[in-house]
Amino acid sequence: MKVVMPETMRKMDKLAMEDFRVPGIVLMENAGKAVADAVDRAYQKQCFTSKKVYIFCGKGNNGGDGFVAARHLKNKGFSVEIFIPEKKESIAGDALINLTILEKMNVSLNYIFSNEQLSRVYDLLKKEDGNFALIDALFGTGLKGDIEGRYKEVINLINKTKGYKVAVDIPSGICGRTGKVLGEAVKADETVTMGLLKPGLLLYPGAVYAGKVTVADIGMPVDLIEEIGPEGILLNEDFIKDLFIPYPPNVHKGFFGKVFIIAGSKGLTGAAALCALAAQRSGAGLVTLGVPESLTAVFEVKLTEVMKMPLPDHGGCISLEALDRALEFSQKVDVVAVGPGLSTNENTKKFIREFVINCKKPLVLDADGINAFQKHPDLLRGKEGDIIITPHSGELARLLNTVPLEIEENRWQKVVEAADEFNCTVVLKGARTLIKSPSSPVYINPTGNPGMATGGSGDVLTGMIAAFLARNREPLKAACAGVYIHGLAGDIAREKKGEFSLIAGDILDNLPEAFKRIF
Ligand SMILES: NC(=O)C1=CN([C@@H]2O[C@H](COP(=O)(O)OP(=O)(O)OC[C@H]3O[C@@H](n4cnc5c(N)ncnc54)[C@H](O)[C@@H]3O)[C@@H](O)[C@H]2O)[C@H](O)CC1
Ligand SMILES: [K+]
């Protein structure tokens, strides 16, 4: 499903009107009708039972959508009351036409400015004890800068009030680009967004403020929707299914690809084992785990199906002496994954850098495989060939020489920046993992849950992505499939065990179930 920046949606509105001659008021009619239908559906589902609707309208077209919704709701037998924190003179164009219709229909219109008026509104709503719907049509894609002053008071009032809340296009105060709260924002139960999804409805905290999101068809010409190069794509099951080509019944294990995983150190053998088993469970034909020589016995006990390649180590950490053996073996496989549990030992980091620079095969870099480049981002930048990096915000911050908060607050922008800068596929892990390769849109993953924020979860993901890459040789697709199915397995694990106790092994254990659900 396509995801566009608010400014792109505005451009599309303009093109629909200018090039396709769809009158703006027609788009507004469809938008407002979609909101009224959503409110009616909520009433049918008994989200509220009183047939009362309070609508807060701003002075722009978002408010105009609210006016249209009011008319349709009144026609459906709802009692409708409107609050406008503006002077009537500031309302113009299509919004004014729809406001005028409401005047003729004797809909109650209240222009609210003073604190006394505001508190009267609050008292009125409080009396209803939440048994009504409230529509937020204050700001949509036209919001600029922070919400301040009177609007801040109004949004506070809305949030203090109970009631079933429906936001028009985007909750007022949420940045459509980033999902950030701009000063103050409406917490909605659902959002009816116009035409296409916007990033701010999918990224946190915006996703929480938006509640359940539905996309309304506002009559935008299909040619326009097909033509538009979206900034993002929301992953779904159909998209993932398409990434796996069917195979013949007489298939051999070479068809599914060979994966070499370089992982593990003293105290971190679990990371390596999780990664290798995840690759195996994700359909890799052959998995070989390169491990510190001194720990081989541990892995022989831990892992049955996975082959081991002992590599020279110092004190349980793979050392630079392992370079030739590892490089030589890499020639025999399709994909190499480097990172889980390798440690931040200086000598190991040197090994990692030398290996990555000289390896001729597609690579998946995770954890310490990424950390090794913290002070040498130029080496990663200059590396040719297919690379997927799978950082969380801390790892990406180290690589981009910034702080994790900067990444967390600008996840979309930062994944774009990293894919460009390192000319590789970047998987920025976290709530709503984002995936991007240099020339692609940003892919947004809807699966997964907070229970998956647990040690070893990322190691499982790395193994999965490596297995898919060995199979389809397409980094972006492998990364998308890995992230989506990893999240799905985590969601299935949560169904069975709850979020609280979820551990990485549960994600691994539920991979078969996740694959069964998809295929
Ligand atoms: N034909 C169309 O374009 C359609 C648009 N739809 C809906 O319209 C909104 C976008 O409408 P627009 O008038 O451009 O902007 P807003 O209604 O979001 O509000 C802008 C309004 O508010 C003022 N403003 C901006 N920032 C602030 C602020 N921080 N504090 C106070 N005031 C602010 C600004 O000056 C404007 O006057 C879109 O989201 C859809 O809901 C329809 O869907 C149909 C097609
Ligand atoms: K809104």
Image (spheres, helix red, strand yellow):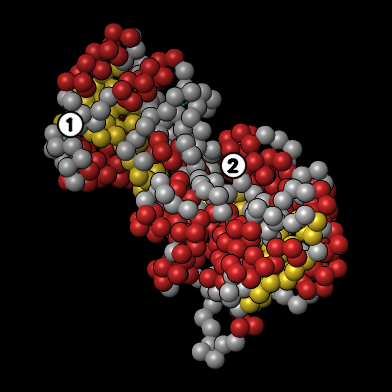
Quarter containing ligand 1? top left
Q: Position of residue 2 (x, y in %)?
A: 49, 54
Q: Secondary structure at mark 1?
A: loop
Q: Nearer the viewer, residue 458 or 68?
A: 458
Closest to the observer, 363 or 128: 363
Q: Nearer the viewer, residue 377 or 207?
A: 377
Residue 261 is situated, as x and y percent measured from the top left of the image, at: 68, 66
User: Do callouts 1 and 2 mark residues in contact (Cβ within 8 Å)?
Assistant: no
Residue 189, percent from left and from top: 32, 38
Question: Amino acid type of disc 2?
Answer: Arg
Q: Residue at x 40, y 15 (%)?
A: 150
- Residue for point 44% across, 64% down: 510
Q: Secondary structure at mark 2?
A: helix
Left or right for 315, reference 257: right
Residue 225 against residue 125 in the figure, above or below: below
User: Hey, which quadrant is residue 89 in on the image?
Assistant: top left
Residue 226 seen in the current view: no
Q: Give percent across and percent down for residue 54.
A: 24, 28
Label 1 to label 2: alpha-carbon separation: 38 Å
Reading the image, the residue beneath label 2 is 411
| Disc sitting over residue 131 in the figure | 1
Residue 319 sits above or below residue 121 on the image: below
Report if the beta carbon of the residue with label 2 is closer than 8 angstroms to ligand 1: no
How would you rate the neighbour count of disc 1 (Cα within 10 Å): few for under 14, some for 14-19, many for 20 or more?
A: many
Badge 2: few (under 14), some or many (20 or more) residues near its Cα, within 10 Å? many
Q: Earlier in the sequence, mark 1 or mark 2?
A: 1
Determine whether 84 is above or below 394 in the image.
above
What amino acid does circle 1 point to? Asn
Residue 451 seen by the camera: yes
Residue drawn at the location 25% of the way across and 17% of the way down: 121
Please indicate whether residue 450 sits to the left or right of residue 283 in the image: left
